[in-house]
Amino acid sequence: MTNSAEKSATTERKKAKATGLAKASGVVAVMTLASRLLGMVRDMTIAFFFGAGFATDAFFVAFKIPNLLRRLVAEGSLATAFVPLFSEEIAKSHEDAVDALRRVATFTFVLTVALTVLGILFADPITALFAPGFITQAAKFELASTLLVIMFPYVILVSTLALASGVLNTLGEFAWPAAAPALLNICLILAILLFGNSFEPGILVLAYGVLFGGLIALIPQIIVLRKYGFSIRFSNPAGSPVVKRLCRLMLPSVISASVYQLMVFINTVLASLLREGSVSWLYYADRLFQFPLGVFSIAVGTALLPALSRAAANGEEKNFTENLERAFSWVSYITIPASAGLIVLATPLAQTIYFRGSFSQADLVHTATALCGFAVGLWSISCHAILVRCYLAKKNTLIPAIVACVSIAINLIMAICFMGSPLASDTSSAAQIITLCQSYLPVFEFGHIGLALSGSLASFFNFYVLLLLLPRISVALPLRRTLYDILLSILCSLCMIFVIGRCPIFSEFHIMFTLLFHVLIGMLTYLTTSILLRVSPALQFYSFFRQQILRFLRLPT
């Protein structure tokens, strides 16, 4: 009887842990979905008013710079590195956790203010460094530099936001942190609609909207933190053991946690050397690609890091491995068909979202083809995000940082090979360096599409090497069942593609109707075949859905 009771209790604990991770992932996914939908509305608004060309190229390059610092300093290193440390402090006492948060918050503020001052003072050299193709285009260069000066203080706001969000996630609060990007998107949409005609050039409204949106997104996080008994105040970070440990973890995690964003940024720099509009086409395609990546993959990763950190801090290796395996299984089940769907439906998707106003037919074609290049790497990028959180939870940031550096180098080499020749009219030193490198490498004239594809291919290498090195951090991941589910998901995705290819195109209706019809048919086909083939996540989803229906009908489960 005792053994039976212990087995029953163990089973219930496993169910509770799985439910906890699934619930947290679900909350983040729902809020992120709302944010991504608003992000699409924002991008549709930008495309309608500004199209893809001179002004948008300047804005997207300028915004990439503080946004990259956000990824590196805030989300990529500071927040992710602080979560395991904060988990340890809160396990000691509430007072230790409060003190750690205040010292790290002060350190974050001082660091980001210094970066902002430097960014404003050296806006022109920074613009020249990150958009070398603009140097020979004086008007575009000046506009990009002006936009950069306006938006640089965004780094202070969003870094504080990322720190607050990481703490709230550790405390089990996922809704408000996940809602922050939605608030930013709402501010940008309202800025364009209400004040788009109040600036000359009109693209300046986006820069001021970014600043205002960052402030509005931060305020709710501070309020919720106070409810949990945490207030962000100034406290001397000098000599703090937590700040010292954070600094040791930050530098390697800057690269490892943000490797994909670094690849995208490098490819944006190279795109500035190509024909006008290339930067904008990559941006618009990446925004569509970020939708499934953010809603599903980042949602699981956000919920996973606190769970892994707690398991590592408490020495619960079995729980650690189970959470990691479960995350792999679910992310693979979702991203494999999503990748196939993005490739098959790239053109109608881009047409539905962007094809109106100043967005031309040529812009549509170039954006859709770039989306296909990005979509190739959806699965590997998503799984890499999970692996990085595994290493961070184990407080090992060196291995993923080294692997990330090699991956970035591979991405750069492939990008130079695939991007084709820079514009003949571009006589900048960057264009000359690229031309020199291409004289020693095979060159394919893929243009901006090659830049998107190079990041996807490099991400496969990054993921695979990190997976092989898991034993170095004492993680034995049983992949047999997961690999079997992945193969079945690929088979189900092929069935989905076959069915979508046989679906009619309703030319008499708006393209959106055809897109929604194809998406619905594809989802039903994938779900049905995966249930019939008994893919683990599909069976879990079916069991959960069946229980909810029976409860709704008041029937025994």
Image: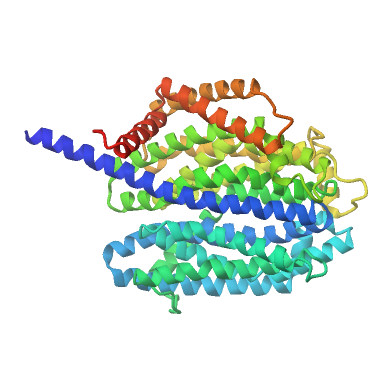
In the displayed structure, 540 sits above or below 499; it is: below
Q: Nearer the viewer, residue 393 or 502?
A: 502
List the single residue furthest toward the left.
1
User: Is 206 on the left-hand or right-hand side of 476?
Assistant: right
Residue at image point 53% right, 38% down: 463
Q: Is residue 413 left or right of residue 390?
A: right
Visual colour scheme:
rainbow
Residue depicted at 75% across the width and 52% down the height: 47
Pick whichever, 247 or 200, lies toward us: 200
- Asked if 279 appears above or below 3 in the picture, the reply is below
Locate residue 9, reporting x and y percent. Answer: 17, 40
Residue 98 lies, in percent from the top left, at: 36, 72
- Residue 215 vertical position relative to residue 60 in the rendered view, above or below: below
Q: Is residue 22 left or right of residue 209?
A: left
The residue that appears at 28% across and 49% down in the rendered structure is 315
In which quadrant is the C terminus drawn? top left
Total numbered circles: 0
Q: Please provide percent x and percent y for residue 418.
A: 76, 36
Residue 58 appears in view: yes
Q: Residue at x 79, y 32 (%)?
A: 442
- Observer-nearest of 108 and 550: 550
Q: Position of residue 280 (x, y in %)?
A: 76, 50
Query: Within the image, what quadrant is residue 157 found in?
Result: bottom right
| Image quadrant in which the N terminus is located | top left
Residue 533 shows in this picture: no
Judge by depth and name the residue closer to the eye, 248 or 85: 85
